[in-house]
Image: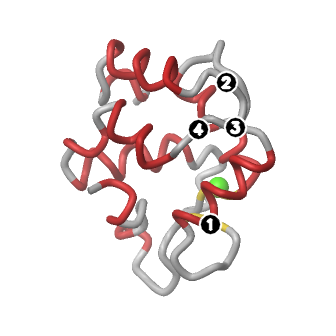
Amino acid sequence: MSLSSILSADAIDCALKDCQAPDSFNPKKFFQLCGLTKKSPQEVKNVFNILDNDASGFIEEEELKFFLQRFSAGARVLTDKETKAFLAAADDDSDGKIGTDGEPHSNITFPSSMTN
Ligand SMILES: [Ca+2]
């Protein structure tokens, strides 16, 4: 499965164009622009699984850095500042990675605060 089978190419394009400049990335706005906020919990989880490149059940800082490139190979990498801000916004329990601790693996996804 790829992100383009879940999200429309136009929406991905629009979301990537909005954050072309370094340090302009805003995860919540990106999720809105790429259409993720309108997707079902299962579809959001599918996106999470694609971004979790090593299938660890979490999105770690290293995976987050290449977040935009998972949407389009030609996109830039996130700056350290953006990566840390993204992590801080999505990491509910401050363990340095995205995903919910203590939940069954099947429930791990983005916190709803990011996708609503
Ligand atoms: Ca991972």
Q: In this view, does 94 lie to the left or right of 33?
A: right
Q: Is mark 2 on a helix, strand or loop?
A: loop
Residue pointed to by mark 1: 88
Residue 19, relative to residue 13: is it above or below? Answer: below
Q: Label 1 to label 4, Cα distance in Å?
A: 14 Å
Residue 43 falls in image quadrant: top left
Q: What element carries label 1?
A: helix
Residue occupying the point 59% across, 38% down? 25
Residue pointed to by mark 4: 25
> Callout 1, which amino acid?
Ala
Q: Is residue 59 left or right of residue 17?
A: right
Q: Label 4 to label 2, Cα distance in Å?
A: 8 Å
> Callout 4, which amino acid?
Phe
Classify mark 1: residues with Cα within 10 Å, few (<14), some (14-19) or many (20+): some
Q: Where is residue 107 in the image (x, y as percent from the top left)?
A: 35, 70
Residue pointed to by mark 2: 21
Residue 53 falls in image quadrant: top right
> Callout 2, which amino acid?
Ala
- The reply to whether the residue tagged 1 has its Cβ within 8 angstroms of ligand 1 is no
Answer yes or no: do the residues labelled 4 and 2 have beta carbons within 8 Å?
no
Q: What element carries label 3?
A: loop
Residue 101, relative to residue 86: is it above or below? Answer: below
Q: Quadrant of ligand 1?
A: bottom right
Is 83 in front, or is 43? 83
Q: Which of marks 2 and 1 is nearer the N terminus?
A: 2
Q: Is mark 4 on a helix, strand or loop?
A: loop
Q: Label 3 to label 2, Cα distance in Å?
A: 6 Å
Question: Residue placed farthest to the right in the image?
Answer: 80
Q: Nearer the viewer, mark 3 or mark 1?
A: 3
Question: Residue placed farthest to the bottom in the image?
Answer: 102
